[in-house]
Amino acid sequence: GNSVTQMEGPVTLSEEAFLTINCTYTATGYPSLFWYVQYPGEGLQLLLKATKADDKGSNKGFEATYRKETTSFHLEKGSVQVSDSAVYFCALSESGGYQKVTFGTGTKLQVIP
Amino acid sequence: DADVTQTPRNRITKTGKRIMLECSQTKGHDRMYWYRQDPGLGLRLIYYSFDVKDINKGEISDGYSVSRQAQAKFSLSLESAIPNQTALYFCATNTANTGELFFGEGSRLTVL
């Protein structure tokens, strides 16, 4: 079956540091890939997505590139802010049919001033 | 107002009690889902529904039941709550055209 593996947290960074959160996946076919963010006390919301190989998703300074050859979708941001403190989930959605969504376990990011 | 609304937001109950969590949406989506979030386990799918007459079990449906009362409403019931059902529960919606899920703010359930 499909699976998503992301680096364990928590990750603690100083403000303006560079962020990478690793995500790799296993899937049949050609899934779409997503990063969701969960701010404290809130539900998950879509941060960015990519629907095919070599696509780059970007939003709010975050970027991730769909790498089919390495089955990866690593999240990056050049300069994090305290307001980026949240839990980040990598996810994939099957193509066609049910489009089942499989989530990683989440990575908590804490940014300190 | 939120597009996906869950009630209650917090609930404390005792073992053996029946609990219902409700979800309503104004997005006009046909697909609705119930997920459970536990620390270190991510989100796990409990039930999903593609329309009013369609109900499907997810990964962890044992101990849960659902009802799709209308396109906009999808409720989750715990017939006899047990402590290991203590978790954060999320309702989500989407359509067949996109994999993106839209989540409610969550219902935190504690079973003593």
Image: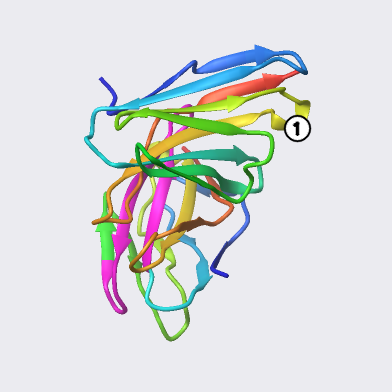
- Chief secondary structure of the magenta span? strand
Residue placed under numbered mark 1 in the picture:
B84
- Hey, what amino acid is under mark 1? Asn
Q: Which residue is drawn at 56% across and 49% down?
A: B58
Residue A57: x percent and y percent?
28, 63
Q: Which residue is drawn at 24% across and 28% down?
A: B26
| One can see residue A10 in this view | no
Along the horizontal axis of the image, is A30 left or right of A111? left
Quadrant in which residue A31 is drawn: bottom left
Q: Which residue is drawn at 38% across and 60% down?
A: A99
Does the stretch in magenta take in A43?
Answer: yes
The stretch of residues the image draws in magenta is A32-56
* Residue that lies at the very extreme toward the bottom in this rendered image: A69
Q: Quadrant of the C terminus of chain B?
A: top right
Q: In which quarter of the image is the N terminus of chain B?
A: top left
Residue B30: x percent and y percent?
28, 42
Q: Residue at x 39, y 31 (%)?
A: B104
Does the stretch in magenta take in A73?
Answer: no
User: In terms of depth relative to the viewer, which is nearer, B96 or B9?
Assistant: B96
